[in-house]
Image: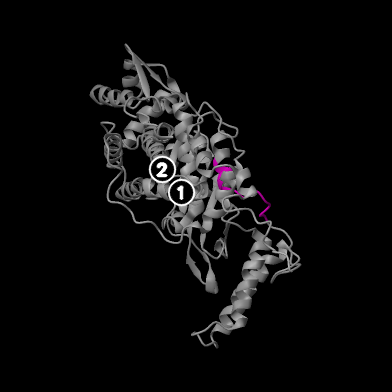
Amino acid sequence: MKSNQFENTPAPGKYPTLEKMADPLKALADLVHNHPDDSASRTVATTTLLLSLWQLAGRGMTNQAPSLVMINTHGEGSSSMDALASSLVSPQVDTGPQLYKDGSFAQGTPEMAPNAMAGAIRRYHEQRKHANLAWTPPELQMHEERFFAAQKTGFGYGRTRRYAKAWHDTFGLMTERDCQVILRLDSTEDLAMFRKHVADNPHCLQAALGFGPGLEMVSKRLCLSGAITPEQWDAEFAGRAVELGLPLLFLPDAAREPSTAVLPAAIQFMLTQLPEAFKGALEEPANLVPGVWFAHYGELLRTRLRMLSPTSDYALQRMARQLFPVSLRLTTCAGLWSGASAEECEALALDLCAHALRGMVISVAGLAWHGLGFDPGSDRKKALKVLDYLRRNSPVSLSDLTRYGKVEKAVRDTLLERFVAEGLVRVDGKIIVAVSYEEFAAGLYVRKEFPEPANHWGEAAEKSDAAA
């Protein structure tokens, strides 16, 4: 009798590989709640976690993924929270330019790739003139395959690319066939090109173009991931970036506790599944999550966004409303692998959403450093001029600010009142002290107006334990 070829198959629910990964939902919860005494670390880590997973899911989650650029308050050197973002969105294998031994561009070198790509485009369009457009002849498919194989050899592959390496004068923004990409700001070269695009070619970010399927110039979807220093985030750059009208957060990284960049196996498994996990953009709710805490943050966000451009207001309001359905999709997905209850999935989704909403509002409040998102009591140009004088000459007396800062007394008093309210300066009697960016950023996370959310995951766990 022939032996049963499936006799050694594990019983349902007993898969050794998955067991080694532990519980994906609990692994997510640990990343959110492993900063028990540090409000800033908890919010920055959770915002980073949610937005990075969202970026990986891409168009399967929403038509436009958000961008997250952290302001490293500790100055030069790597940011532990940005290291977390990088570990989430960057593949663990070499995806850079290299020679391949098989495929449509086998044995081709990176140096040969641009000519091969240009040739594939030319031949594709020459042959298409004579093709029956109701179907795609094998020759056209061959040229398209060669283009993407040569691009892989010459410029690398993957959902995530270095910002400066992703753009080409001839081929535009290079992506995979799905026409979406996460652009990392990992070097001075990346930041320099990003700044140039913001200043001189904003359409590169607002309406990126590059060759896609059919070897036509098509619209590409991009989002940003990375960190910059406060010095690199100057007033002109910040103002222009905000005017782009994108769901873009500049989040002050005031975390005291480092967040591990060595991800649990369960999270690494999720990362491999997310690009194909969702097949359609979620339905966007009309409002935020019901409740007093969310209503408070919704009002804070609306108040500050009214002081920005209408396009930025719209983009960030949409993003705020997408936070919970995105969080719930992710936790439900993890819960399927974990065998978790709907209540547990919803509880962790609330935690992800709440901390990310807090991160959003703190990000927008952080724009006050450059006179954005609040009413300074004067035009922004004058407010920035006074701020610059104070930061260069602090401490400054009231009379010196009037005399040498060239500001009228009434305007001075109004500006100082607004600056103090935003945590930009301190006034001690007749002496004004401009705070450092590090002090300003740390202060954002302890303001009474920005309370932390409840621990919904902890509450769900307590109920589960009690029921057991």
Which amino acid type is shown beneath numbered disc 1? Leu
Q: Does 180 appear above or below 323?
A: below
Whether the magenta-drawn stretch holds residue 164 is answered as: no
Q: Residue 399: where, in percent of width, then height? A: 32, 16
Which amino acid type is shown beneath numbered disc 2? Ala
Q: Quadrant of residue 460?
A: top left
> What number is the disc on residue 189?
none
Q: Residue 411: where, in percent of width, then height? A: 25, 26
Q: Residue 15: where, in percent of width, then height? A: 62, 50
Q: Are marks 1 and 2 in contact (CB under 8 Å)?
A: yes
The CA span between labels 1 and 2 is: 8 Å
Whether the magenta-drawn stretch holds residue 86 is answered as: yes
The residue lying at 50 percent from left, 69 percent from top is 217
Which residue is nearer to you in this view: 160 or 30? Answer: 30
Which residue is nearer to you in this view: 459 or 383? Answer: 459
> What number is the disc on residue 330?
1
> What number is the disc on residue 349?
2
Q: Secondary structure at mark 2?
A: helix
The residue lying at 50 percent from left, 57 percent from top is 277
Q: Image quadrant for the N terminus?
A: bottom right
Q: Is residue 35 visible?
A: yes
The residue lying at 55 percent from left, 72 percent from top is 215
Q: Which residues are magenta?
A: 85-96
Q: Is residue 186 visible?
A: no
- Label whose residue precedes the other's in the sequence (1 or 2): 1
Toward the front, the furthest residue is 1
Q: Residue 287: where, in percent of width, then height? A: 28, 47
Q: Does 172 appear above or below 442?
A: below
Q: Does 433 appear above or below 322?
A: above
Q: Quadrant of residue 418?
A: top left
